Image (spheres, rainbow, N blue to C red):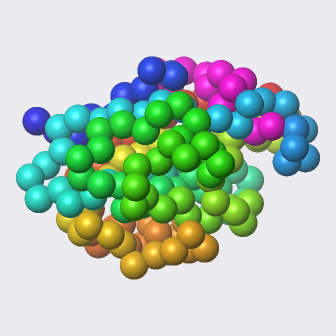
């Protein structure tokens, strides 16, 4: 069975609800709830010792996309992240999991806030089945470096893409 990623918050290709969009507190002109969606996975391959979850916008006008969320060292016994688990103050992540730095320079989930009129952006949520219990990263590690370590330690991955535009 292949690794599969699903969500109670959205389906593949659907527009993300305003509860997942960046809040006005960040100053990017959006007024959402900035709550990470529920994510669940099944079908992890043999040898999985931990999971990682990322959210990446490949359509961001940066030349390198935009990392909206990173969580590593999720225990192998975990099969879902609750709604708003990306809120560092909520305490909803499993013990041992680490949220890494987003492209806003802080940890935790950062919701969509594409430039007005830029067209639809894809928010690619990925779960990685990792062959190590922990990756050698900290909360201050960038998405690119997390991606580097995941590239060499992933057994299998699955994606679920949400959309948003303004």
Question: What residue is shown at x 36% (from left), y 72% (from top)?
Answer: 135
Q: Left of 79 or right of it: where is 59?
A: right
Q: Is residue 151 magenta?
A: no
Horizontal side, residue 45 vs residue 139: left or right: left
Q: Quadrant of residue 162?
A: top right
Residue 5's place in the image compared with 9, above or below, is below
Residue 44 location, x and y as percent? 18, 45
Which x, y percent locates residue 29? 90, 38
Q: Is residue 5 left or right of residue 98?
A: left
Residue 73 position (above or below residue 40): below
- The spot of residue 112 in percent (x, y) is 70, 39
Residue 140: tell me if it is visible.
yes
Viewer-nearest residue: 108 or 149: 108
Looking at the rendering, the stretch of residues picked out in magenta corresponds to 11-23
Quadrant where the N terminus lies? top left
Q: Residue at x 74, y 60 (%)?
A: 104
């Amino acid at each position: 069975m292949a690794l599969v990623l699903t969500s109670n918050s959205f389906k593949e290709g659907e527009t993300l609800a305003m509860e997942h969009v960046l809040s006005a507190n960040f100053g990017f002109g959006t007024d959402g709830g900035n709550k990470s969606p529920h994510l669940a996975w099944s079908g992890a391959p043999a040898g999985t010792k931990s999971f990682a979850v990322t959210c990446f916008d490949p359509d961001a006008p940066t030349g390198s996309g935009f990392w909206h969320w990173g969580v590593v060292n999720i225990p192998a016994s975990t099969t879902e992240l609750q709604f708003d688990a990306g809120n560092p103050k909520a305490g909803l992540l499993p013990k041992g999991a680490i949220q890494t730095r987003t492209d806003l320079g802080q940890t935790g989930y950062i919701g969509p806030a594409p430039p007005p009129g830029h067209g639809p952006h894809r928010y690619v949520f990925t779960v990685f089945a990792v062959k190590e219990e922990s990756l050698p990263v900290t909360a201050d590690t960038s998405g690119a470096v997390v991606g580097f370590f995941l590239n060499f330690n992933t057994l299998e991955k699955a994606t679920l893409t949400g959309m948003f535009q303004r």
